[in-house]
Image: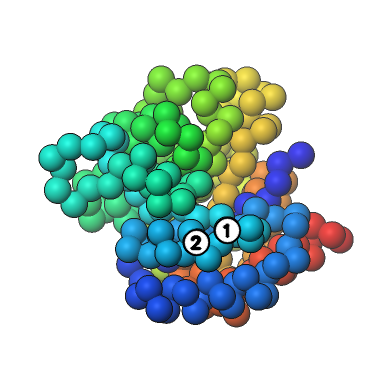
């Protein structure tokens, strides 16, 4: 049985004070949620102080990226070891905004993935097609490319530690959510591919989140799909009330 995981990607939003206020609200409103893994991924500058606030809570901390070297003359970069030290359990890798604006490619995703795993961080690896690729009927080809190259050299034990986030680029920050049928089709494709790359039992154990304009109004339908194991939430995770509602609605679906 795969446990649902809902993560908030705060992107480049929130000062320390704003982050503390949001965490206080989430701790107050979500303390009794047990059937969902809850993760927040704030900017680097907030990690350490929010980690202290999250001790003994049911909310875990993640970062939005990392660099693959442990340390060195790499100005502006942050390593897996530093993220662990700051209190992270999770790290997002290969987000489409990194691919689009910062030159992230499958090879760098793969190096980051290996560095995260070597340090005991749980990677949330993002894959997904652009609008042009979807319209050109290349969705599955893009997913295959992102996954086979991103996971290159990752063995079965390691892949079991990984979470995949299917994030169609055309749905991120646009308000255009994939329909639950579109999400399920892509998730099923990803799971079938993982079964080919590893085996069915392994594929059945890996959690696949959906990301792209998830909101309180669409989470229930998405979460009901057989292969949708949670959500990676951007914009709606910046507001305590909407992130809480997303999680509460998912929890209700699980109980029904
Ligand atoms: C994201 O940042 O991963 C994301 C899915 O953003 P949004 O929910 O705003 O579309």
Marks 2 and 1: in contact by CB < 8 Å?
Answer: yes
Residue 218 on image: x %, y %: 63, 68
Q: For residue 46, what is the image quadrant?
A: bottom left
Look at the image and tell me in which quarter the C terminus lies.
bottom right
Q: Is 124 left or right of 32, judged from the image as shown?
A: left
Horizontally, residue 80 falls left or right of residue 234, namely left
The colour scheme used here is: rainbow
Q: Residue at x 26, y 34 (%)?
A: 69
- The picture places residue 142, in percent across and down from the top left corner, at 40, 39
Residue 122 at x, y = what percent?
A: 50, 40
The residue at which mark 1 appears reads as: 55
For label 2, the residue is 52
Q: How many marks?
A: 2
The quarter of the picture where residue 39 lies is bottom right
Question: Considering the image in quadrants, where does the N terminus appear?
Answer: top right
Please report the residue visible at 54 percent of the width from the left and 41 percent of the height from the top.
Answer: 163
């Amino acid at each position: 049985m795969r446990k649902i995981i809902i993560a908030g990607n705060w992107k480049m939003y929130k000062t320390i004070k704003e982050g503390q206020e949001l965490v206080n609200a989430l701790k107050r409103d979500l303390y009794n949620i047990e059937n969902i893994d809850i993760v927040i991924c704030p900017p680097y500058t907030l990690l350490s102080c929010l980690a202290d606030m999250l001790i003994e809570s049911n909310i875990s901390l993640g970062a939005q990226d990392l660099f693959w070297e442990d340390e060195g003359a790499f100005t502006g970069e942050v390593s897996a070891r530093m993220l662990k030290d700051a209190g992270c359990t999770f790290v997002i890798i290969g987000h489409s905004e990194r691919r689009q604006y910062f030159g992230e490619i499958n090879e760098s995703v793969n190096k980051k993935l290996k560095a995260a795993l070597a340090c005991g961080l749980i990677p949330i690896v993002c894959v997904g097609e652009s609008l042009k690729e979807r319209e050109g009927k290349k969705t599955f080809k893009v997913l295959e490319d992102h996954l086979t190259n991103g996971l290159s050299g990752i063995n079965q034990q390691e892949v079991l530690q990984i979470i995949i986030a299917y994030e169609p680029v055309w749905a991120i920050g646009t308000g255009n959510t994939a329909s639950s049928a579109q999400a399920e089709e892509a998730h099923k494709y990803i799971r079938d591919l993982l079964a080919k790359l590893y085996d069915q039992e392994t594929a059945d154990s890996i959690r696949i989140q959906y990301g792209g304009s998830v909101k309180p109004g669409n989470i229930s339908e998405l979460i009901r799909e057989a292969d949708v194991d949670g959500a990676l939430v951007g914009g709606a995770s910046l507001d305590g009330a909407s992130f809480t509602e997303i999680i509460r609605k998912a929890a209700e679906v699980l109980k029904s």
